[in-house]
């Protein structure tokens, strides 16, 4: 499974790889902040977890497609 991701990842250009890394990092950060529940961060980053996730991904992934 990891090899499939690694293969797909290597096919991406450098800037697309960076963009994908940012998306994954923000999603991970959102999940961690939601779990811990610290102050204002979950409400700010938590936006990535709901309907705005698609808008965020579209914003980042738009130029890729």
Image: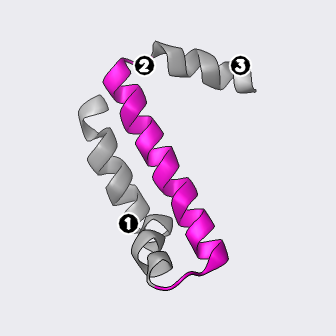
Q: Quadrant of the C terminus?
A: top left
Q: Is residue 8 left or right of residue 35?
A: left
* Residue 48 place in picture, x, y as percent: 44, 64
Q: Quadrant of the N terminus?
A: top right
Among the two numbered marks 1 and 2 on one chain, the one whose residue lies closer to the N terminus: 2
| Badge nearest the viewer, 1 or 2 | 2
Residues at marks 1 and 2 touching, judged by CB atoms closer than 8 Å: no
Q: Is residue 14 left or right of residue 36?
A: left
* Disc 3: CA contacts within 10 A as few (<14), some (14-19) or many (>=20): few
Looking at the image, residue 23 lies above or below residue 56: above
Question: Which numbered dot is residue 3?
Answer: 3
* Residue 38 place in picture, x, y as percent: 56, 81
Q: Which residue is mark 1?
A: 52
Residue drawn at x 44%, y 69% as measured from the top left: 45
Instruction: State how far apart marks 3 and 1 are (Cα).
Output: 30 Å
The magenta stretch is: 12-39
Among the two numbered marks 3 and 1 on one chain, the one whose residue lies closer to the N terminus: 3
Instruction: State how far apart marks 1 and 2 are (Cα).
Output: 25 Å
Q: Main secondary structure of the magenta part?
A: helix
Check the image and name the residue furthest to the left.
63
* Residue 62 place in picture, x, y as percent: 27, 40
């Amino acid at each position: 499974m990891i090899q499939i991701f690694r293969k797909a990842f290597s096919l991406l250009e450098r800037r697309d790889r960076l963009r994908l890394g940012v998306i994954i990092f923000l999603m991970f950060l959102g999940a961690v902040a939601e779990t811990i529940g610290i102050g204002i961060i979950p409400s700010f980053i938590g936006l990535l977890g709901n309907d705005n996730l698609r808008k965020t991904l579209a914003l980042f992934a738009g130029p890729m497609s």
